[in-house]
Image (tube, coloured by chain):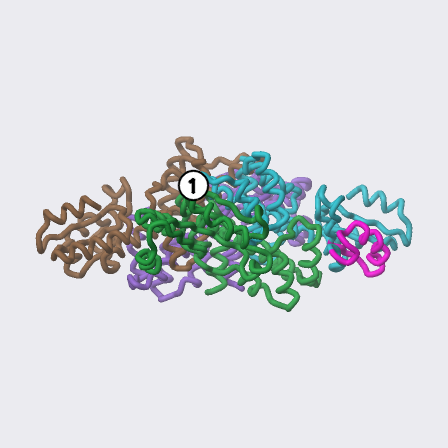
Chain colours: A green, B cyan, C purple, D brown
């Protein structure tokens, strides 16, 4: 916060500031207004892809004015998986970080759905199931195939236990922000909430 | 049940019976024993892939004896996405249907995680978000990309509302079987349970 | 089961059998039919009150035919807190145990609601709250006052920690039966389900 | 807020301000500091009992300094169910409203536990259960007896349906504050959270 506030001093009218981190969208809205008052353009880019993004391109949700996003478009096309895929201008300042926040909430839920399933398979001792084998079977042709399942299969290959698997999803605070937002909007969100609670339990 | 019981009369020693449906694994275990007493081989094949399996191959979780599965292997390779991918012999009779049951429980959880996320995005009216656009952004490069997200994006393109999206996942009874099994095994499974409850609520 | 089945041999037409335990209501329905075929009357009495019932009287939910319950009425009045309070004929055989089962499910939920509240109070270290003092304050005049709160206050007086408090509610299997029943009836029951899951977690 | 801020102008050193409402405890902490700077004493009194408190006395959780609470003690004894029961000095400014907030969170959970139980009883049509009769049976001798059950029984006597019963517990915002606080403290609180979500669902 103070960084941008101070940087605000360094920038001058017509400059463009980009926040590609996991900022809270409410702060992003506020920063956008603060910078706009100084005539400085601001774009928030919610970025998904982790360390794999370097190779495969990043999925980017972009918030800001038409003109600001237009001037950033060449850079976005370079970072995205393709010129016209994996990125988009979703709305005004703050909306990029908002959509990324919800994306992370979903990620928590997906990961916990797999974790529960593997827990049940593991607990069914009489069948002597091989969790890694099953994760590999599901990776091809099944309706539960996904990028997170690919990661899970890799981890299970190294004989990782299930608690490590949950650890894929970083606890960057966006999970709890998503729950706060859902409650503020009167939307029941039990899956995402329990994925968050499962983190608390695993830490206790 | 009575079908197989009657069919049991038709089969004779050395025959091989295959159940590729969504049977309850407990019945499958029982049937396997019943048929084994008559010298009839039995293989249960949990099959995922839906109508898309015809084109892309099916993901198959196979339960049965080594010899029975061996004699079925040519057929399995033909139906699978590849000779050695997307299928596997996971354990004795019943284990194929058990793993498929848990697979469906996970599917419920995944679908509901997306549904909650899109509900939150939709409720945030001040940003005027386009749910279809966001689903497309996430399909490429993001960590929440998956086969179910592809289906969701297709549905949102046709202007489907969110309740239709949840409808992808058929309520074949396997969701509630998964919850029963989790409770029998003393495994807390809040995500899958709430995905099931969300069905109840949407029907009320 | 076998006990009653064998006892069935001992009883003869016109006798009255009473089951005051925590039997599964489905078995009770079956037993009632089995005994009825032999002309033996059967009454199921769901009984609440624990060790305190001896002094205060038991709360009793009674299932059976009009005539059978009528002949048991003198005994029920003696055991109840009063002649016409704390007991009732709720329906046919099985309904007494069914209502008692749901009663226990509610008990799980109530206990866990208190447990969560006290956990939050305890975690708020900056206020240095005295859990026993607060439980005593709430016992008089507050809208959360209850018999279970009285028990909780007693336990906290002995410096019990919160895990002991949850232990009040015996895990007699009726909690999970209630969840199974809710799912069979398509009723979402998140509170009772999570109270059950909390047991699983505390045991892990 | 502005009221107290303005009132601050009216008060002078040595005065005592009391907030007996359902303020957010964070604001209470802030107000206490603001008033302390002006030499004005401040006491926050979390008050439970509703309209019945007039007759039965209120349950009061009191936050503030020793001296401030001491000077308020005569009034507290008058309002409480008894001189030394149903009220207590729980900690510094803010703690009275904090404990009351958690009290309301518990209230949500208790009410929803009963609501779920009665929903299951109602759905079991084959037994033709009388919900009012059962609520009365449970009021005497059972371990689920409570003040909220007394209210529920009264409502069921008037043939109220279950949605009305949930309406006992006012949605004063303290339910969601409790969930926010639990998440901030890393405490999983599924019962209270689902009691809150059940409100959202019933409003949709």
In percent of width and height, residue A168 lies at 54, 61
Whether residue B92 is visible, yes or no, is: yes
Give the residue pinned by disc 1: B127
Residue ID at (19%, 51%): D76
Is residue A25 one of those drawn in magenta? no
Quick check: C65 above or below B195? above
Task: Identify the residue at image location x=56%, y=65%.
Answer: A164
x 77%, y 58%: residue: B84
Mark 1 belongs to chain: B
Give residue C52's position: percent from left, percent from top.
42, 55
| First to last magenta residue range | B61-85
Q: In x, y percent, where is residue B140?
A: 59, 50
Res. C86 visible in picture: no
Front-most of residues C151 and B16: B16
Does the magenta segment cover residue B84? yes
Q: Is residue C154 above or below residue D168?
A: below
């Amino acid at each position: 916060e103070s960084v941008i506030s101070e940087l605000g001093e360094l920038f001058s009218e017509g400059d463009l500031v980009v926040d590609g981190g996991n900022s809270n969208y409410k702060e992003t809205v506020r920063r956008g207004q603060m910078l706009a008052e100084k005539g400085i353009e601001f774009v928030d880019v919610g970025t998904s892809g982790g360390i794999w993004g370097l190779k495969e391109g990043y999925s980017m949700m972009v918030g800001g004015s038409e003109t600001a996003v237009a001037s950033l478009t060449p850079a976005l096309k370079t970072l995205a998986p393709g010129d016209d895929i994996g990125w988009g201008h979703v709305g005004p300042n703050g909306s990029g970080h908002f959509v990324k926040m919800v994306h992370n909430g979903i990620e928590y839920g997906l990961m916990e759905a797999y974790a529960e399933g593997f827990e049940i398979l593991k607990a069914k001792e009489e069948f002597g199931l091989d969790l890694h084998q099953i994760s590999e079977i599901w990776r091809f042709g099944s309706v539960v195939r996904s990028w997170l399942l690919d990661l899970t299969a890799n981890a299970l290959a190294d004989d990782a236990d299930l608690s490590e698997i949950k650890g894929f999803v970083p606890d960057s605070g966006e999970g709890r922000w998503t729950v706060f937002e859902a409650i503020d909007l009167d939307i029941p969100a039990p899956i995402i909430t329990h994925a968050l609670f499962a983190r608390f339990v695993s830490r206790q």
